[in-house]
Amino acid sequence: MLAQTAGATPEIAWSSFAPELLVAGVALALLLFTVARDNRIPATVIVGLLGLALGAWLLSQELWIPGGTVVGLSALATSMTIGFEGRHDLSNVWIAGLAALGALLLTGWQWVEVLDPQLQAVSQGLSGGLATQLQGSVAHDGIAFFTRITVYVTVLLVLPVGYGYLRDREIYRPEVEPLVLLAATGMALLGAAGDLIVVFIAVEMLSFALYVLVGLARRDRRSQEAALKYFVTGAVASALLVYGMALLYAATGTVDIAAIGQALGLVTTPDRVAVLGVALVIVGFAFKVALVPFHLWTPDVYQGAPTSVTAFMSAATKAAGFAAVLRLFLLGFGRLEDVWVPALAVIAALTMMIGAIAAVVQRDVKRILAYSSLAHAGYAAIGVAAGSAAGLSATLWYLLTYAVTTVASFGAVVAIERRRRGEVSLVDLKGLGRTSPALAALFSLSLLSLAGIPPTAGFQGKLAVFTAGVESDLTWLVVIGVVSSVIAAFFYLRLMAMMFLEEAEEGAPEPVVSTGLSAGLAAASAAIVVLGVIPATFLTLAEQAAVLAR
C-alpha cells in the first residue's frame, strides 16, 4: 500500500489553465513557423493535424467545449495559413486572434463547469475552499477568471489595431504576435498565481516579452531608449520584488500566499522581517503598475514604444499587476493591513494628483495619455486600499473598463500617427473633427470614458472604486480622486476642443484608418458604450469573482 502511494502520479487538472496552454502553444507554433519559413505550410498542416487529434481526444472524454474549441481553431488556423500563402504576417495576426478568442471561450467554459458550481457551494455554506492546482501554485478562482477576460479581450483589440501601423512604420516582424501571446500568457498566469514563485515567473515572462516589443523600432532612437529604460527599471523592480519575497519566506517559512496570510500576525513570525518584505513587494509592484514615486519610466517608455505596444502595456499589464496585488495584499497580507493600507492610500493619492497635474502641461498626446494612465492606476489602487470584497470586485471591474477605453484612445493615436511617422502633438489634432469626423468621434468617446463622464464605461468603473473607498472609510482618498478627475477632465476636453473647435492646418496629412484599425476601434468603442449603459452582467461577474476569491 505504501509503495503504491509513493509511486502514485499526482493528477493535474490541465483544464484549470487550458486558456494559457492554448495561447502559449499557439505562440510557440508561430515562432516555429517563423524559424522554418520555407516549410511553413507543411509545418502548419502537421500542427493542424496534431490539434485535430487532440481535439478528437478531448471530445472522446466528453469535454465538448474544449474539444470543439481546439478542433475549430486547428482547422481555421490551417486553412488561413494556406489561404494567406505569401502573406505570412497576415496569417499570424488571424491565428493569434483566434488563439485569444479560443482562450476567452475556454475561460467561459471554466466558469460554467467549475467556478459557477463552486460559487453555489460557497453561497450555500457547503464549501469554503477554493480550487487550486499544482499544490496551490495556481489558483482557479474569480481573480484569475476576471484577469483572463481583461487580458484576452485586450489582445483581441490590439492585434488588428497594431498590424497596419507596424507595417507602415516598417518595424513589423513575424515575432510580434508570438511575443504578444507570450506576454498575455504571463499576464493571465500572474492573475492566477497562488504562490510567490509563480508570481515571479509570470512577472518575468510578461516583462521579457514586453522588453522586446518596446524596442521593435531598431532605427528609432526613442524606441531603443524606451526599451533600455524599461529593461533597467524592470530589472530593479524584479530585484526588489524577489528580495521582498525572500524576506517573506524567511519570516513565514512558506511561499504559498494563503499560508503566508495565516502565518502573518502569529507570535512565532518576526514582524519586522515580514513588514520589510511586504514593503519591498509594494515597491516592486508599484514599479510594474506605475504608481508614484516609482513611475518615472512611464512617460518616456510609453512615448518611445510603438503606439500599439503602448496600448497593450497600458491596458493588460495594469490588469495583471493589480490582479497580483489584490491576491497578495487582500488574501495574503490581510493581517498586516494596518501597515500597508495607509502606505498604499498615500501612494494612491500622490499618483492620482501627480498624474493629472503633470498631464496638463504636456504637448505630446502619448505623454498626456501616459500621465493619464498614472492617475488611473491611482484610481484602481483605491479599491485595493479599501481592503474589502467590494474593493476587490470594484478594482477588477475598473481594470476591464480602463482596458477597453485605453485601447480605443491609443488606437485613435495610431491612426493619426500612421501618416505623420512621428510624434503626435496637440497641433496635429487641429480640425480632426472636420477631416475625419468618425475617428474624432470615437477618440472623443474614449476621452469621455477616461474622464469618467456618464454613461461611459469609465464612469461605471470610477463609481465602483469610489463607492468601495467610501464604504471603507477612505472618504478623504475618494475626495482626492474626485479632484484629480476634475483636473484630468481639463486636458481631455482640451484634446476634444482641438479636434472640433480648431481649423485644420493647410497641408496637414489625414489619418490612415485601415480595415483592421476600424474593426478594433469600433469594437473597443462599442465595449465602452455597452459597459457604460448596461454594466449589470460584468458587475455581477466581478462581485461573484470577489466572493470566490475570499
Image: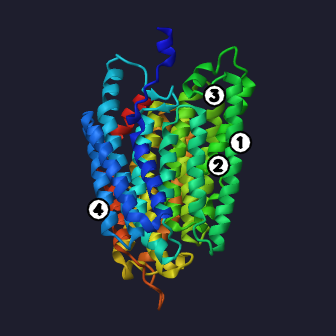
Work out whether mark 3 precedes mark 1 in sequence or the reverse, and give the earlier one: 1
The CA distance from mark 2 to mark 1 is 10 Å
Structural crowding at the residue carrying mark 2, measured as other residues with C-alpha within 10 Å and reported as few (<14), some (14–19) or many (≥20): many
Q: Is residue 9 above or below residue 290?
A: above
Residue 2 screen position, x and y as percent: 50, 9
Disc 4 element: helix
The residue that mark 4 highlights is 79
Q: In which quarter of the view is residue 123 placed?
A: top left
The CA distance from mark 1 to mark 4 is 47 Å
The residue that mark 2 highlights is 287
The residue that mark 3 highlights is 338
- Identified by mark 3, the residue type is Asp
Label 2 with label 1: CB-CB less than 8 Å:
yes
Q: Is residue 449 above or below residue 37?
A: above
Q: Residue at x 30, y 27 (%)?
A: 117
Work out whether mark 2 precedes mark 1 in sequence or the reverse, and give the earlier one: 1
Structural crowding at the residue carrying mark 3, measured as other residues with C-alpha within 10 Å and reported as few (<14), some (14–19) or many (≥20): few
